[in-house]
Amino acid sequence: MKLLIVSATRLEIEPLISNFIFIEQKNKNLYSYRYRDFEIDVLIAGIGMVATAFCMGKTLQATCYDVAINAGISGSFDYNLPLGTVLNVTHDRFPEMGAENGEYFLSLVDLQLLEEDSFPFQNLELVNSSIFQSPVLNELPQANGITVNTIHGNEENIHKIREQYNPVSESMEGAAFMYACLLSGIRFIQIRAISNYVEKRNRENWNIGLAIKNLNEVLWKVLDE
């Protein structure tokens, strides 16, 4: 099986790939490995949706993959989920894509620049309908996420985004990854581990180490099924 693993930073998936057999570095961002029966390309795309979209487009144009996995950490709007919880993000969106009209936000649909269900969107969401025979993956909590250029840390803005979309997770790359996969017709998974809650910035409340540990443990289990 030909597998693509995508992460914003090497740090987030280092515990996993450190045990792969290294084959070659294909370019600045793409590395080739082998593990068991898997041929695995690891794409360290960089932080943010622009970097992710560019690297995904370049990579998927050059190589056909059976499955792509986006693995990383994220913030969570849901305080009922403990830090370190690993999520299967099945719905994602770009909540900033639109225009302001005074105190109101206008989506691309409101602006009549996009039909509500124009492919690959469904009601302006990106939805993962890929099916996997994976007990580990299927036991993960499914979540809806948002992908942003600016991580929320203002209480008023956090309240607005909750009211509008009620997201569980927040990342800077997820929807860009899903967009590329949907347009390329490739099965995919977005797996995120919660490192912090979405609140006024307070690094003392974060637990990046636990999130990375739990994320990589789940990735190992998925590969070893």
Image (cartoon, rainbow, N blue to C red):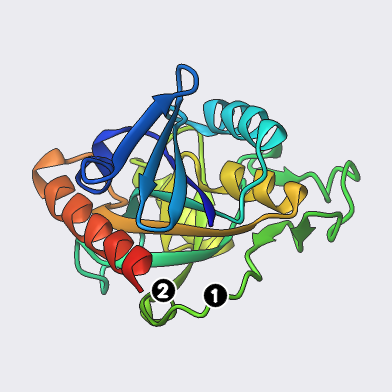
Kindly identify the residue that appears in the image at 33 percent across and 41 percent down: 153
The residue carrying pointer 1 sits among few (fewer than 14), some (14 to 19) or many (20 or more) residues within 10 Å by Cα, namely few
Instruction: Determine whether 221 is above or below 179 in the image.
Output: below
* Amino acid type of the residue that numbered disc 1 sits on in the rendered structure: Phe
> Left or right: where does residue 94 sit relative to residue 35?
right
Name the residue carrying label 2.
Answer: 137
* Amino acid type of the residue that numbered disc 2 sits on in the rendered structure: Leu
Secondary structure beneath disc 1? loop
Front-most of 70 and 202? 70
- Residue 123: x percent and y percent? 76, 63
Kindly identify the residue that appears in the image at 29 percent across and 68 percent down: 221
* Location of residue 33 (image quadrant): top left
- Residue 218: x percent and y percent? 28, 65
CB atoms of marks 2 and 1 within 8 Å? yes
The mark tally for this picture is 2
Q: Residue furthest top?
A: 28
